[in-house]
Image: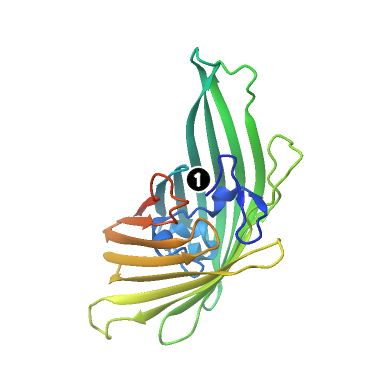
């Protein structure tokens, strides 16, 4: 998927992109739904998909998102704070750790340890505009670092830093059946350059539009299961043809107490494939789990597994 240098190939175009780790799905709910999240909202996961969805958060929420892949482990901590009718302010820190690698001088042994990471620090503001329309914007400080400990003479720290924005809108249609549409552009920013190298790679900017609707719900005044369907289209921005791909998800369950989710990402990249997951909420605590099944030539030793935990005040 993403290389240790944070670079990867854009789907279809073959162009090298910097900060490719920004395309790795964060959040078990959206991951299980095949990454069809442009119209989703109401939890801190929206920080990574469509910041407009953060406007639906009604209570302060703290969340921890974790995933493990063959390329490394990702962890994100997010805090969202509604501000008494002024909108929702959200802050997040996301780290993808590629692991530790020994520095050796040959057969004599190790003299140090190299650690490579991608980091994204984010701040977002989202608010209702009018009627059923919400909007959001998120700023990202993006960095790739290679640090060495112990005796690392001759091995300088490698750092690449850039900045980007995510901008999104969502609109609840005035229909009897709940229908939400959303659109977002992600990773819109400066090229990614490491230590003033000659080559600076464009960020993986993506335009994503989608719809979420309730296909089945209990009769008025009755308790029971509901079924939601989500469908998105995602395309590449700034590299010629958009080359859109489909993202689809379905979930069913009883309120937020128990949810079962299925999805499929029809991406022209190593992130394509089916996914499934479950979600549970008891009181103020919610837990979501997801498993993705990428192509055999991409998964390496294991398929990615995602866990999200959130607490509302």
Please identify the residue farthest to the bottom as the structure is shown. Answer: 176
Residue visible at 64% across and 34% down?
A: 159
**Where does residue 18 sit, x and y in percent of width and height?**
64, 47
Residue density around tag 1, few if under 14, some if 14–19, many if 20 or more, within 10 Å: many
Residue visible at 69% across and 48% down?
A: 201
> Relative to 286, is 196 on the left or the right?
right
Residue visible at 50% across and 42% down?
A: 95
Q: Which residue is mark 1?
A: 94
Q: Is residue 97 visible?
A: yes
- Measured along the vertical axis of the image, is residue 152 above or below residue 58? above
**Where does residue 298 sit, x and y in percent of width and height?**
47, 51
Residue sitting nearer the eye, 156 or 127: 156
Residue visible at 60% across and 59% down?
A: 11
Disc 1 element = strand
> Which coloring applies here?
rainbow
Quarter of the picture holding the C terminus: bottom left
Residue sitting nearer the eye, 183 or 136: 183
- Measured along the vertical axis of the image, is residue 122 above or below residue 147? below
**Where does residue 226 sit, x and y in percent of width and height?**
30, 76
Residue sitting nearer the eye, 94 or 44: 94
> Relative to 219, is 264 on the left or the right?
right
- Measured along the vertical axis of the image, is residue 109 above or below residue 17? above
Q: Is residue 134 visible?
A: no
Please identify the residue farthest to the left as the structure is shown. Answer: 223
Give the number of callouts: 1
Q: Tell me which corner region of the image, top left, top right, bottom left or bottom right, holds residue 73.
A: top left
**Where does residue 252 sit, x and y in percent of width and height?**
31, 72
Please identify the residue farthest to the top as the structure is shown. Answer: 108
């Amino acid at each position: 998927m993403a290389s240790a240098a944070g670079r990867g190939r854009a789907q279809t175009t073959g162009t090298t992109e910097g900060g490719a780790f920004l395309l790795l799905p964060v959040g078990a709910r959206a991951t299980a739904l095949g990454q069809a999240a442009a119209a989703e909202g109401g939890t801190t996961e929206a920080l990574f998909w469509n910041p407009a969805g953060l406007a639906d958060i009604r209570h302060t929420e703290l969340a921890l998102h974790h995933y493990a892949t063959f390329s490394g482990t990702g962890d994100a901590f997010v805090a969202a704070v509604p501000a008494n009718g002024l909108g929702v302010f959200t802050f997040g820190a996301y780290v993808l750790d590629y692991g530790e690698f020994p520095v050796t001088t040959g057969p004599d042994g190790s003299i140090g340890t190299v650690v490579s990471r991608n980091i994204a620090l984010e701040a977002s503001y989202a608010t209702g505009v009018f009627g059923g329309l919400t909007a959001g914007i998120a700023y990202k400080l993006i960095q790739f670092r290679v640090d060495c400990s112990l005796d690392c003479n001759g091995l300088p720290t490698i750092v690449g830093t850039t900045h980007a924005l995510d901008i999104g809108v969502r609109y609840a249609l005035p229909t009897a059946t709940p229908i939400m549409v959303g659109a977002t552009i992600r990773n819109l920013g400066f090229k990614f350059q490491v230590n003033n190298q000659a080559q600076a790679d464009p960020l993986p900017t993506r335009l994503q539009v989608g719809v979420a609707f309730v296909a089945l719900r209990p009769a008025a005044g009755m308790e029971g299961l509901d079924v939601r369907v989500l469908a998105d289209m995602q395309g590449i921005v700034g590299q010629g043809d958009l080359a859109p791909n489909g993202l689809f998800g379905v979930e069913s369950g009883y309120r937020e107490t128990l949810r079962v989710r299925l999805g499929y990402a029809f991406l022209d990249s190593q992130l394509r494939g089916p996914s499934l997951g479950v979600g549970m909420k008891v009181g103020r605590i919610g837990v979501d789990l997801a498993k993705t099944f990428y192509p055999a030539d991409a998964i390496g030793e294991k398929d990615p597994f995602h866990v999200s935990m959130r607490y509302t005040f």
